[in-house]
Every structure is written in C-alpha cells, then in structure tokens.
Image: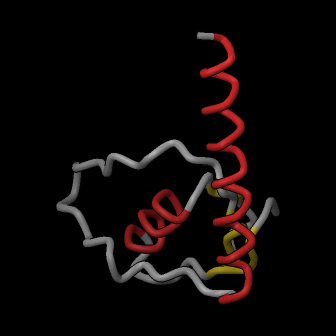
Amino acid sequence: IKAIAVTLLLALTFTTIFNVECATRHQLVDCSKYEKLPQGKERFCYEIYAPICGSDGKTYGNDCFFCSEVLKTNNKLKFVRFGKC
C-alpha cells in the first residue's frame, strides 16, 4: 500500500509540474470560466498548488484563488507571472 501511495503522489507531482510548464507558455490566466459570486458567498477552490503572482504583490495558490480575487476586485487585480511573487 505504501508503494501505491508513493506512486500516486509522484504521478500527481509530475502532473502538476507539467501543467505549470504548459501554462507558462501561454502567459495568461483565463478567468472566464469563473463566475462572479453573490456577495457573502465563497468559492470552493481545488488544492493543487500552481502559484500565480498578482499585481497586488500576493501569491495565489492557483488560478481558482487568483480568478476569485480578480472577480472580487472587478478586474483591478492583474496577472504578473506564474510562480511566487
């Protein structure tokens, strides 16, 4: 069972790294798939770590967290780069 767990963890790690590398080629974050939520509602974001640096100097854990903040700020928050700020 430990071997299966380690194998799955490694597969997830490589998949995440591959996704970040592919995304850096586009140099954009597409927030169109996220809708603005009513005030007081919180979005459920997945926990895959793929950091994005925003124009506010904060690092967001992934595109879901970043896009949620973009929508909260009425598109004032801008994409700076993939990776930590």
Q: Where's the N terminus, which quadrant?
A: top right
Check the image and tell me how it is coloured.
Answer: secondary structure
Quarter of the figure with residue 35: bottom left
Quarter of the figure with residue 37: bottom left
Point out residue 58 in the picture as x, y percentages from the top left corner. 70, 59
Residue furthest out toward the top: 1
Image vertical order of residue 53 relative to residue 43, above or below: below
Image vertical order of residue 67 relative to residue 46, above or below: below
Residue furthest out toward the right: 85
Point out residue 2 in the picture as x, y percentages from the top left corner. 66, 11
Residue furthest out toward the left: 38
Question: In percent of the image, x 69 and y 66: which residue is there?
Answer: 20
Question: In percent of the image, x 75 and y 71: which residue is there?
Answer: 21
Point out residue 72 in the picture as x, y percentages from the top left corner. 39, 67
Question: From the viewer's perspective, is 70 left or right of 59?
Answer: left
Point out residue 10 in the picture as x, y percentages from the top left corner. 71, 37
So how many labels did they put on this image?
Answer: 0
Quarter of the figure with residue 25: bottom right
Question: In percent of the image, x 58 and y 58: which residue is there?
Answer: 62
Question: From the viewer's perspective, is 12 left or right of 37?
Answer: right
Question: From the viewer's perspective, is 34 left or right of 81?
Answer: left
Image vertical order of residue 65 relative to residue 63, above or below: above
Q: Where's the C terminus, which quadrant?
A: bottom right
Q: Nearer the viewer, residue 74 or 84?
A: 84
Q: Which of 20 and 45 is in front in this view?
A: 20
Question: In percent of the image, x 41 and y 49: which residue is there?
Answer: 45
